[in-house]
Image (spheres, grey):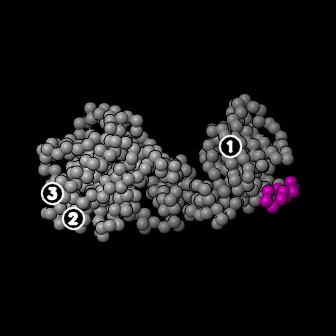
């Protein structure tokens, strides 16, 4: 199919009927092809056209060469061009991230500034089917959910991608037919960045397995995008109250949506931790970042600032097989976990001035483990007692202060509390015939 007609079909299929398009022009083959095709389509489809070029000042004379090329091309075609200069390296500290990430943020900042000049306008970028495949592989390598496998969207706000169904070979063939030259970014030839390594090393191997890899990857992204859209529409009718009863896939997606609405990024492990708390209808508080906390109350999940969160709602899922320290800034405490091999677990409780220490038999732990604050009604069967002791009674005997009681920590698994800060380990996890034990130390700073 003649390339402009293929692009026209993509624009029609994805509702890209607009009154003005600003073509993002780098000077490379993809963006030059996009500009020429949009020129052919503009009269037929009734939209006006301009272009924007961003000079990132990263490649010295080569960056200036690209800018000059874009100026001359637009002058010859009669297309209005806006040029922005951004100093990526100078802005890296403010934006954070790599050179590539900072350049992308600054570039899109310029795009949005250009959009302000034209009412109801859209920026068209030159991402193609090969870029989409690279993005999917990049997201897979970093670890992703459905959203990452969706790849590059055809439309995102005022950004459209008319070339997303076109391959690089089609783009280059079109430019050859037109006798149109373009510039090449020398950094695209280097394997220093992850995307280039995927392009030069990974994709050629996948093409050996399936020569239609790009088409297959595009099909995957479209199917996944439809699935993601279904999830989002379904979740519009989901309320927080019935969250624990949802399928885990939907529940995690809903939790992820809540976090996203609060501008919180979290790992898959943290997402699973929150999902487990919700599913078990636990009362918990999990620090997300800074002063933001996820608060779970009987299966209801909210994101709150620390001022609105009670200290005794703290609840953290821990991995007993990872030694290390857990710092609790709310109480200025450190919980140290140390694995001890072939220790005798028959030990007495030591309550020192600033230290509580006890051993727990790994083999007696059941299910996931949570570190939390003591709650009303909590009981533990301590070693040798033969009955459950209310932690409140223990604290009375130890004459703990009100603040000490509020910040008193316990650990529980699926069978209940097996360790308490001021009482040590329970009878259930104390006994053992040698083997692997966990030493728990609480340092009150």
Q: Give the mark, 1 or 3, whose residue is nearer the N terminus.
A: 3
* Residue where numbered disc 3 is placed: 40
Choose the circle earlier in sequence order: 2 or 3.
3
**Side of 244 relative to 84 (left or right):** right
- Check disc 2 and report the residue beneath it: 48
Q: For mark 1, give the secondary structure.
A: strand
Disc 2, SS: strand
Q: Which residue is drawn at 25% across and 65% down?
A: 20
- Asked if residue 255 lies in the magenta stretch, the reply is no
The secondary structure that most of the magenta stretch takes on is: helix
Q: How far is the residue under mark 1 from the one under mark 3?
A: 63 Å
Image coordinates for residue 69, horizontal then vertical, percent: 25, 47
What's the magenta region?
395-404
Q: Residues within 10 Å of mark 1 (few under 14, many from 20)?
A: some
Does 403 lie within the magenta span? Answer: yes
As measured in the structure, the alpha-carbon distance from the residue carrying label 2 to the one carrying label 1 is 61 Å
Identify the residue shown where x is 42% and y is 40%: 141
Residue shown at 28% from the left, 52% from the top: 25
In the rendered image, is residue 357 in sight? yes
Determine which quarter of the picture holds residue 399: bottom right
Q: Residue 325 carries which label?
A: 1
Q: Residues within 10 Å of mark 2 (few under 14, many from 20)?
A: some
């Amino acid at each position: 199919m003649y390339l402009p007609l293929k692009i026209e079909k993509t624009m029609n299929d994805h509702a890209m009927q607009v009154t003005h398009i600003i073509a993002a022009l780098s000077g490379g083959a993809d963006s030059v092809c996009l500009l020429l095709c949009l020129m052919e389509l503009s009269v037929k489809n009734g939209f006006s056209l301009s272009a924007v070029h961003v000079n990132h000042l990263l490649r010295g004379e080569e960056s200036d060469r690209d800018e000059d090329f874009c100026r001359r091309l637009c002058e010859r075609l009669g297309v209005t061009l806006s040029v922005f200069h951004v100093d990526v390296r100078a802005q890296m500290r403010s934006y954070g991230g790599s050179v590539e990430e900072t350049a992308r943020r600054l570039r899109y900042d310029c795009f949005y500034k250009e959009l302000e000049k034209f009412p109801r306008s859209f920026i068209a970028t030159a991402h193609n089917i090969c870029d989409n495949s690279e993005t999917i592989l990049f997201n897979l390598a970093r670890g992703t959910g459905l959203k990452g496998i969706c790849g590059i969207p055809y439309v995102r706000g005022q950004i459209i991608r008319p070339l997303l169904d076109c391959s690089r070979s089609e783009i280059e063939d079109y430019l050859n037919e037109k006798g149109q030259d373009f510039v090449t970014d020398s950094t695209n030839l280097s394997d220093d960045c992850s995307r280039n390594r995927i392009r030069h090393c990974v994709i050629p191997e996948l093409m050996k397995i399936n020569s239609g890899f790009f088409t297959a990857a595009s099909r995957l992204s479209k199917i996944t995008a439809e699935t993601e859209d279904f999830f989002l529409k379904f979740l519009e009718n989901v309320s927080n109250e019935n969250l624990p009863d949802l399928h885990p896939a939907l529940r995690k997606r809903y939790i992820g949506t809540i976090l996203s609405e609060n501008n919180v990024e979290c790992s898959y492990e943290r997402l699973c931790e929150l999902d487990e708390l919700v599913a078990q209808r636990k009362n918990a508080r999990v620090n997300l970042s800074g002063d933001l906390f996820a608060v779970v109350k009987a299966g209801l999940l909210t994101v709150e600032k620390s001022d609105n969160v009670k200290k005794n709602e703290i609840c953290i899922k821990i991995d007993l097989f990872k030694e290390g320290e857990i710092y609790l800034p709310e109480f200025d405490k450190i919980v140290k976990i140390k694995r001890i091999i072939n220790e005798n677990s028959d030990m007495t409780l030591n309550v020192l001035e600033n230290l509580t220490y006890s051993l727990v038999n790994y083999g007696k732990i059941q299910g996931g483990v949570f570190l939390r604050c003591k709650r009303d009604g909590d009981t533990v069967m301590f070693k040798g007692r033969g009955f459950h002791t209310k932690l409140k009674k223990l604290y009375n005997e130890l004459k703990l202060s009100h603040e000490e009681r509020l910040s008193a920590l316990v650990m529980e698994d699926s069978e209940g509390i097996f360790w308490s800060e001021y009482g040590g380990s329970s009878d259930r996890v104390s006994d053992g015939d040698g083997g692997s034990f966990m030493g728990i130390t609480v340092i009150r700073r």
